[in-house]
Amino acid sequence: MTDNRTKITILVTWLSLLYLFTVSATACNVPVFRYALERWPADYYETVVFHRGPLTGVDAAAVERLKNASFDEVPFANYRVRAIDLSEGAPPDMLELWESLDNPDLPCIAVRYPESMPMRRSIWTGRLSGDAVDALVDSPKRQEIARRIMDGESAVWVILESGDIDRDEKALDFLESQLADIEETLTLPGPVDGTYGISAVDVMSGPEVRVDFSTVRLSRDDPAESIFVAMLMHTEPDLFEYESHPMAFPVFGRGRALFALIGDGITGRNIQMACDFITGACSCEVKALNPGVDLMIVADWDRAILESWIQDTDLPPLVGLSELVEASDVMTGATKKTDSTENETYAATGESNDSGDGPGMKNTDLRDDAGTVTEAGSFPGMLTRSIILAIGLIVAVVTVLTLRVGVLKAGSKSS
C-alpha cells in the first residue's frame, strides 16, 4: 500500500491549498465544530420509493410515514422522498438508478447520498415496510451521537468494528487513550490576527461547548444500524476492501463525518490532526470546501443552539497575492514539521504505521503548528480571487483522485 507518510504529505498539501485560498479572508476564532453546528445545515439524502401501480394499505401508510418524518415532524430527518411509479415511466436519472438495483422486489426503497456528493448510486436498498422506514429514519447509535453533540461535545468518534474482537478492542483502547491525552492538551482557538476575530473564545460566558471527545462502538452485524453502517461504508469507494479492519470516523457539527482512519492508519498523529481540524479556528467558508460527508440523523439541531458563538460582521479585505506567497512559506514549514513527527499506531500489530503494511489515514490538519491562520491583506477584486479558488479546487480534486488511485492499486497488489 501507498506509504502513509506520502499520503499525509499529499493530503496536507491539498488542504493547505484550500486553506490559503479561503481561510485568510474570513477566518475567525470560532472552532470548526461549533461553526458547523450553527451554520452548516445537513445536506438532504434522496430516498426513492419504486413501485408499479398505486400504493395501497400498509405500503401507502409506510410512504406517508416516510414523508412525514422528513418534512412535518420535529425533529425531522435530512432526506427527501420521491415516489416513482414505473408503470408510468420514470425520468432518466431515476430509470438509471432503478436499473442499477438488480431488479429488487417492489415496492422498494433506495437511498442515495445528497446531490452535493459525487457518489450517486444507491447506498442501501430494501423492501418497503414500516420496519424499513423506522430503521431508515432513525437508529439508537445515531440518536446517541446527536445527543452528545448537542450536549456540547466537540466530536463523537465512531468505531466501526471489523468483527475481529482482538483488533477491535485494541483499536478502541488506543483511540480512547489518545483522545484522553488530546483533551488535556488541546485548547480552543486564540485570537486570529488580521481578521475580525480579535479575541479568544470566552467559554465562561458563551454556550457550554468544550474540547471533549467520546467514542461509540458500531457493529456491522447490528440490524438496527444496517443503514448507518451503509452510510459510513459508502463515503469512500474502496472502504469495502478493508472490512477486516476496524475503522474510526469522527462525527461533528450536524452529523458530519470526516474521512475514515483504517486499521494501522489509526495512529496518534492522524487522530491528533483530525482533532486539531475539528477544534481549530473556522474559516467561515461554505461547507462544500471542507472535508466530510453528512449523515442522515433525526435531530432538532437549532434547538441545541441556545447561544451563538458567531457574530455577523462585515467581511475584511480579501487576501493579496503577496500574502499568499508568505502564507505558502509558512505552510511549507508546517508540512515539513508534520512529516518529522513521530508516528504512533495502535497496538493491533505492534508495528509502526510508517511500514506501509496496512490501510492508512484519510484526514489531515488545516492549521499551522501555532494553531493560527495567516494574516489577511488586500485583493484587487472578486474575479481574481474566484479564479484562484477555482485553481485550488482543481488541484485538490486531482490530488485526491491520484491518492485514491494509489490506494486502489495498492489494495489490488495486497490481494
Image: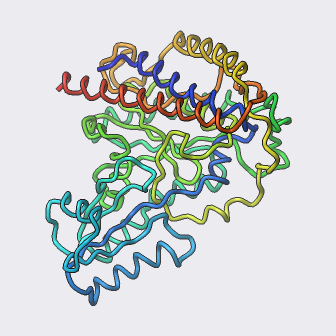
**Residue drawn 83% across the image and 45% down it:** 204
Which quadrant: the N terminus?
top left
**Residue drawn 67% across the image and 21% down it:** 324
Q: Is residue 315 visible?
A: yes
Number of dots carrying numbers: 0
Q: Is residue 272 visible?
A: no
Which quarter of the picture shows residue 224?
bottom left
The image shows residue 63 at horizontal and vertical percentages of: 35, 79
Q: Is residue 223 left or right of residue 255?
A: left
**Residue drawn 50% across the image and 43% down it:** 215
The image shows residue 374 at horizontal and vertical percentages of: 72, 24
Q: Is residue 383 above or below residue 81?
A: above
Q: Is residue 280 left or right of residue 233?
A: right
Which quadrant: the C terminus?
top left
Most distant residue in the bottom direction: 57
Colour scheme:
rainbow
Q: Is residue 342 above or below residue 394?
A: above
Q: Nearer the viewer, residue 167 or 409?
A: 409
Q: Is residue 59 above or below residue 312?
A: below
Q: Is residue 111 left or right of residue 6?
A: left
